[in-house]
Image (cartoon, rainbow, N blue to C red):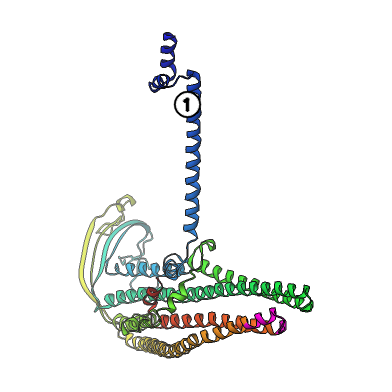
Amino acid sequence: MKGGSASWRVNSGSPYLKLLYDLAAVPRQQVITSIRMTSFRKANFLLLYILGLSVIGLKVQAQADTCACGLSQLLDRVNTRSAFLTPDSAAVLIKLAQQNATRYNRLPEFKLNAQADLGTNNNLPGGYFSYGIVPGNSRVRNEGNSSTILTDLAIASVNWTIYDFGENNARQQVAASDVQVEQSKFNQSKYQLQALAIDNYLQWQRTEELLSIQLLHIQRNKEIQQSVLVLAKSGIKAGVDTSIAEAEISRLRLNYVELKGQREQYKLMLSAIADLPIQQLQADTNFINHLIAHNQTLPRITDSAMADHPLLNYYHSLYQNSLDKERLVKKSYLPIVSLQGAVWGRGSSVSSRDEFRSLSKGIGLERGNYLVGFGITYDLFDLKRKQVQLKTQEAATDYAQKQLQRQQMLLNLSESKVDAQLVTALERLQEIPHQLSAAQAAYRQQLSLYKNGLTTILELNTALGVLYRAETDFIKAKYMYCQSLFEKAITGNQVPALLQFTN
């Protein structure tokens, strides 16, 4: 037994097994089997625990992917991820590249030229106009000579504009204002896309509330239908009431289907604008109520917000760009002072004594020269062209200024209009609860009378229709009020300030 025991301990176990033998008088094989079963159960439990954690993690992830989408987060995503802004952002990069290119306009022109030419040297004196390429042939002889000669020439020349009376600076300023125009256009696109996203978000919220009311109204009609069935079976009401109730429920279901289609359209639009999967959009049901609760502490439109308005900035950048182009026109027709220089070498198979040597003598530079000087270039007849171009650009500047003034006037008009709408929407919102309370009381009374057989189903449906209209009017009043608030914020460039009340 000792040998077997020792052999068993070496082959299969832990020292803790000996303690089990001493404490419990059970066969060793039973202990081993029990421990193995316990380990197996623990392994299964651990595996199930891990699987459970994985499922919980997936559920948490799924909930995170479909979390309530607030308007502030949605607009942040529109500004950073929307594919609708990609073309305008690419246009900004193009203008930035063009601006960077204008910085190299001050580099001098430095040209290198080397050539070897085979031909004749047989000139006569006479002047000519250089239209295109005219070969140079330096020697004039008394007698014609059509012998072939070989010449080579190497030239290094530089032409550097050292003073242009501000033309290059004006050109760089135009390039910078071109960038500003595209950047302002990009900001204007973001501004307009935000307005579109806000409108669709509010419409989506309104539709969600209308769907809730529609479901509640369907449930009320089902309760009426149950009452109708009870009264019809007892002989208190006619059986035609059941058909009327069924028709009303069918009509409400059709309205519900139409509202669901509208909701999907708004969600599809938001999904496209924000580059967000439609499955991750979930309505923030407290958004409108939270906004209405702060109706007395809304921010006022400030001059600083209007001064940085994206619409005004765009038209102001157009106006400034046109002014910069005027300045460039004035500078572009001024004289140009330049430094010019050239170094060249010459070789020829004709010697200095007018000897026609072998062609191999024409390879290699025999004489060298240089020339350095300052030059000024000014075309007096550019004055007329300058006047015409300047008048054209001034007309464009005047047009840009009038566009800016018109946009300012439209914003002021829109602000006054939205203020009037906001007052009306607030008064409507304050009055609607009275209508809703009266409609609820009337419905309860008619339902009680109908259950007691004291009124008809038509009168009950009329009361239910009044209640339904009051509930939908209340939702529409909330939506119109919130829409007016955001129109005012958009007009005054204060959307971020208004969104603080929804967080």
Q: Is residue 490 magenta?
A: no
Q: Residue at x 67, y 75 (%)?
A: 221
Residue 173 in the image: above or below residue 18? below
- Splitting the image into 4 quarters, where does residue 487 fall? bottom left
Q: Nearer the viewer, residue 68 or 379?
A: 68
Q: Residue 453 colored magenta?
A: yes
Q: Is residue 495 visible?
A: yes
Give the percent coordinates (x, y) of residue 402.
40, 90
Residue 67 % position (x, y): 47, 62
Quarter containing the C terminus:
bottom left
Q: Position of residue 305 (x, y in %)?
A: 34, 81
Element carrying mark 1 = helix
Q: Nearer the viewer, residue 332 or 411?
A: 411
The magenta segment is: 445-458
Q: Quadrant location of the N terminus?
A: top left
Query: Residue 427's x, y, as percent?
Result: 47, 89
Tell me the amino acid under the disc marked 1. Answer: Ile
Residue designated by label 1: 35
